[in-house]
Image (cartoon, rainbow, N blue to C red):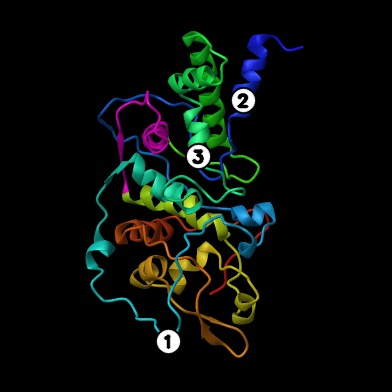
Amino acid sequence: MLSRKGSLVAFAAACLVSLAAMSGAETHKRISGRTSPPQKPIVTPVEGPSNLHRLGINFQASGMGRTGVWGPTPESYEPPPTDFTEAETNTRPVVLSGADIYRLSCQGCHQADGNGSPPEIPAITGPLQATSATLMERRMQERGRPITPAFARELAAGSKKDLLDRLKKGGQKMPAFGYLTESEVHALIGYLDVLAAVPDKGKPATVIEPRERVGELLVKGTCHICHDAAGTWPRPEELLGGSLPPIAGFTTKKTMPDFIWKVRHGAPVIMGSPPAPFRGRMPVFDYLSDADVASAHLYLMKYPPRNAGGLEEPRG
């Protein structure tokens, strides 16, 4: 028979919910109410199969990377305007908040409110609230199983470790986001605490990033959910059959204005045999800014996606 402490630990562990697509690092360091200094994060190319490819899941069978917003039909499509000069030439460093990092890295799966798409993508509220000693003590009291503040802190610390491990290493369906820096994780966790209404949270923090790093976060945190890094660009009939283009071809197939417009507003796709314009299957990421998507284009130009796992190099 379990001891009282053992049963309470098991009860608290059962309250945790799996995460699906957040980002992480090794530790969570509190930096109260100030902007973290630039850490010169090591920007690396995206590589390897997409998360869907890694899991063997068809795009149509998953809620990962979905926004619920779709692009125009071929008949209603309007091409992008020509005033993208600022987005195209702006290479200044960027100050990112935790909300920004969440938007770039997590929202594509967990949605703006953090509720995800259960049961495949659970809400993030449970795991975040389990890291709060205050909430842990309050909830155990409400269930008629009061615990001491010290034991509540012990349980919350264990939950926080589990959370950070999941952020770094990934999970059953969640990809690993171990490339995030400590400051990025701190800013992200600060925002997630707000999103989950955690009472004993620290003050918001921000981090200064080079523009290419912003693009890297978007490409690795959102694009790579569905698109392999490298590979052969599908033929029109393959596209109609469900093949997804590799990230490596994005900058060769589209100019920056076209790329921004495709991501934020959608565009028809030439598919089938004989080739004809169809409404694209890619969701519209209207919560991203022009600057966000321009940063991704800049990143892909400077750090071309790499072959990994036996994937072919892209063809023109």
User: In the rendered image, which quarter is residue 165 located in?
Assistant: top right
Residue holding disc 2 = 13
**Where does label 1 land, which residue?**
75
Mark 1 vs mark 2, CA separation in Å: 53 Å
Residue 58 position, x and y percent, is 66, 62
Q: Earlier in the sequence, mark 1 or mark 2?
A: 2
How many tags in the picture?
A: 3
Secondary structure under badge 2?
helix
**Label 3 vs label 2: CA separation?**
15 Å
Instruction: Please report the bounds of the magenta region as a residue range.
Output: 182-210
Task: Please tell me whether mark 1 sits on a helix, a strand or a loop.
Answer: loop
Local crowd size for mark 1, using a 10 Å CA cut-off: few (<14), some (14–19), many (≥20): few
Q: Is residue 186 magenta?
A: yes
Residue in view at x 65 percent, y 21 percent: 10
Q: Amino acid at mark 3?
A: Ile
- Taking the image as shown, residue 48 lies to the left or right of residue 111, namely right
> Closest to the observer: 55 or 128?
128
Badge 2 crowding class, 10 Å Cα cut-off, few under 14, some 14 to 19, many 20 or more, is: some
Residue 53 % position (x, y) = 65, 57
